[in-house]
Image: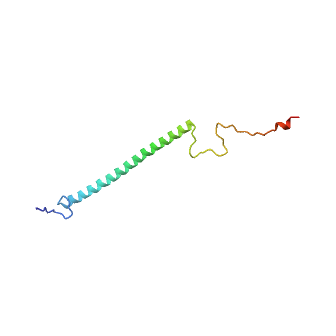
Amino acid sequence: MVQHSSPSKHGLPAGNPLASVLVVIAGIVAIATLIVLGFVAFLALGAVILVAATFVGIRSWWLARRMGVPLRGRARSSKQAPRDVIEGEYQVVDRDRDQP
């Protein structure tokens, strides 16, 4: 088995120290650029999701309002009667009392 000896113990590709420093700087710049681009992509995806959620929410609210469906947060109070019930006061009158 043949072992290749590297000119540097750190495994950098160039034997020239200036070239090694430039490779390290280029690597740091590349990593920083990718981190910034990843953050921008994350923000863009978040913005798209926020706009889509807003659109779906407004559309659902509009359809529910148009159809007359009560929203979850605004349940009917116990004092309010359903729409098909007519409320009113009445008094029971005995017929026997009115006849002579």
**94 on left or right of 5:** right
Q: The C terminus is located in which quarter?
A: top right
Q: Residue furthest left?
A: 1
Where residue 67 appears, as percent x and y from the top left, is 56, 36
**91 on left or right of 27:** right
Residue at image x 64%, y 40%?
82
Q: Residue furthest right?
A: 100
Q: Residue furthest bottom?
A: 9
Where residue 37 appears, as percent x and y from the top left, is 34, 50
In front of the other: 58 or 21: 58
**93 on left or right of 100:** left
Establish if 8 lies above or below 48.
below
In front of the other: 66 or 20: 66
Task: Count the labels in the image.
Answer: 0
Residue at image x 39%, y 46%?
45
Residue at image x 26%, y 56%?
27
Residue at image x 26%, y 57%?
25
Where residue 31 appears, as percent x and y from the top left, is 30, 55
Give the image's coloring scheme.
Answer: rainbow
Where residue 41 appears, as percent x and y from the top left, is 37, 48
Q: The N terminus is located in which quarter?
A: bottom left
